[in-house]
Image: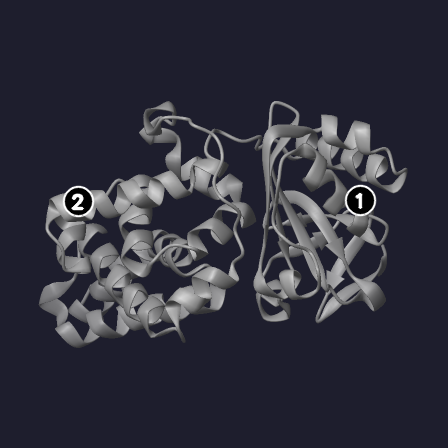
Amino acid sequence: MDAPDLLAERFERHRPRLWAVAYRLLGSTGEAEDAVRETWLRLSRSGPGEAPDRVGPLMTTVARVALRMLRSRPSQQEHARDAHRPAPGGSRADEDVAPGHRAVLADSVGLALLLVLDTLAPAERLAFVLHDMFAVPFDVIAPVVGRSPAATRQLADRARRRVRSVAGLPETDVTRQRAVVDALLAAARAGDVETLAALLDPEVELCTDAAAARAGTRPAHGPAAVAESLAGCAEAARPALLGGTVGLVRAPGGIPRAVVGFTIRDGRVLAVALLADAERIGRLDLELLDGWTTVAGGFGGRR
């Protein structure tokens, strides 16, 4: 195999890992693709002698690219405030989540965690994602964010405190997720707020994006407040797979207008994420359940 082919082969071997890092840092499939593409361009310009045998150096490169993209977003602080996240609840220690489970947690929390990550400053987000989700040492992360290892650890600590509201190992079995979401939807449609609240964790949080907040749904904390918000959007909602986890979609005329993601553990909902931003919804992998299927630009009829 000649040098250019070796370079491409090694990069493709690491591409899924690089995409996962970029997606968690940027929260957008499109931007993640852009970051991975720029990482490849940088590597290809470096020459065949730089063909990476390990993923570590490439993760550092894609992290630098993602950090630049985060910092170039219009008014990063305004972007964070627009996520409209309520104050974090719960008091679980960081050590309660075993390091080996952190990547699994990140995959299964989905929308709720991404909304919380949106509230972090770029350097905090990078330190937390690389260290807690991908086990990158602080002395490797430090040069990327331009801090000392000790200061980088503090960045991750601050970020970790802010994501505790979605900490814990959530339910990953789709059938059990569906049972909880179906029960929640039935109670909401029946106006049974008592049953609805019983399906929610005592420290449940509702997070919204800016578009949902502008439409009138504000962040909420606690079963009563979250149950009231869910009751208001249940009538037109349908169960759907959102990136592999069960949630709800409102799709009048077959066009997804809002999605609701859930973090579920032990039969109760820990966190709810409501998204109404059309561009972000358009990047999600959506599939309506109950025999419906997705089509380009919206949803089609029954199979």
Q: Residue at x 10, y 51 (%)?
A: 148
Does residue 276 appear in the picture of this structure?
Answer: no
- What is the x, y in percent for residue 149? 12, 46
Q: Which mark is residue 160?
A: none
**Residue 116 position within the rendered picture, expressed as x and y whole percent measured from the top left:** 47, 49
CA gap between label 2 and label 1 equals 44 Å
Looking at the rendered structure, the secondary structure element under dot 2 is: helix
Q: Quadrant of residue 297?
A: bottom right
In this orientation, which residue lies closer to the viewer: 30 or 228? 228
In the image, what residue occupies the spot 73% across and 60% down? 294
* As drawn, 237 above or below 137: below
* Residue annotated with mark 1: 231
Residue 285 x, y percent position in the rendering:
61, 57
Identify the element where label 1 is drawn: helix
- Amino acid at pointer 1: Ala
Q: Quadrant of residue 226?
A: top right
The residue wearing badge 2 is 138
Q: Is residue 264 above or below residue 302?
A: above
Sequence-first tag of 2 and 1: 2
Query: In which quadrant will I find the N terminus?
Result: bottom left
Position of the C terminus by quadrant: bottom right
